[in-house]
Amino acid sequence: LVGDIDISDDYLKKQLMFKESMKSIVELNETLYSNYGCLTVNGFGFDKQPMSFNIEYTKESPRALIKAVDILLLESKSKFSNKAVCPKEYIVE
């Protein structure tokens, strides 16, 4: 399910474990394109800090594969995105 993500990397594994980072979900936003999708999950951590998970996944039959994950710790809930955002839209490699 994790596609090209190196699951031996502890930092990346931690990002994939939503239940360990986000205590409550406020909203979900998803956008589908022809061969991939983006999902943004806005919520609060256990310390009540606003955070967003941004996920890109490929649409490969018969299931979707996670291609990229990024966790943003936000200053306030007003910084929640009201649309789905893929990490590749703001991360420069």
Image: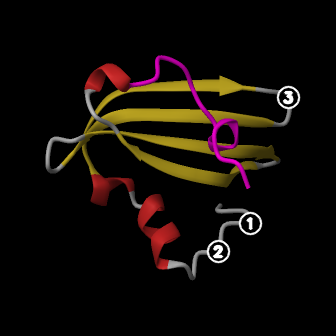
Mark before the other along the chain sequence, 3 or 2: 2
Mark before the other along the chain sequence, 3 or 1: 1
**Position above or below: 56 against 6:** above
Is 84 part of what is drawn in magenta?
A: yes
Name the residue that disc number 2 marks: 6
Left of 80 or right of it: where is 20?
A: left
Left of 9 or right of it: where is 35?
A: right
Q: Measured from the top left, where is residue 53 in percent x and y?
A: 45, 43
Amino acid bearing label 1: Asp
Q: Quadrant of residue 52 in the image? A: top left
Q: Quadrant of residue 37 in the image? A: top right
Amino acid bearing label 2: Asp
Q: Are marks 1 and 2 in contact (CB under 8 Å)?
A: yes
Q: Nearer the viewer, residue 30 or 50?
A: 50
Q: Please give the range of residues in magenta.
A: 80-93
- The single residue placed furthest to the bottom in the displayed view is 8
Name the residue that disc number 1 marks: 4
Q: Residue at x 46, y 23 (%)?
A: 81
Numbered disc 2: secondary structure: loop
Q: Measured from the top left, where is residue 2 in percent x and y?
A: 65, 62
Q: Measured from the top left, where is residue 35 in percent x and y?
A: 84, 36
Q: Characterize the local packing of mark 2: few (<14), some (14-19) or many (20 or more) Cα atoms within 10 angstroms.
A: few
Left of 75 or right of it: where is 6?
A: right
Q: Characterize the local packing of mark 3: few (<14), some (14-19) or many (20 or more) Cα atoms within 10 angstroms.
A: few
Q: Quadrant of residue 77 in the image? A: top left
**Disc 1 versus disc 2: distance between alpha carbons?**
6 Å
Of marks 3 and 2, the one in the foreground: 2
Q: Nearer the viewer, residue 32 or 84?
A: 84
Name the residue that disc number 3 marks: 34
**Disc 3 versus disc 1: distance between alpha carbons?**
19 Å
Q: Are marks 3 and 2 in contact (CB under 8 Å)?
A: no
Q: Measured from the top left, where is residue 47 in percent x and y?
A: 14, 49
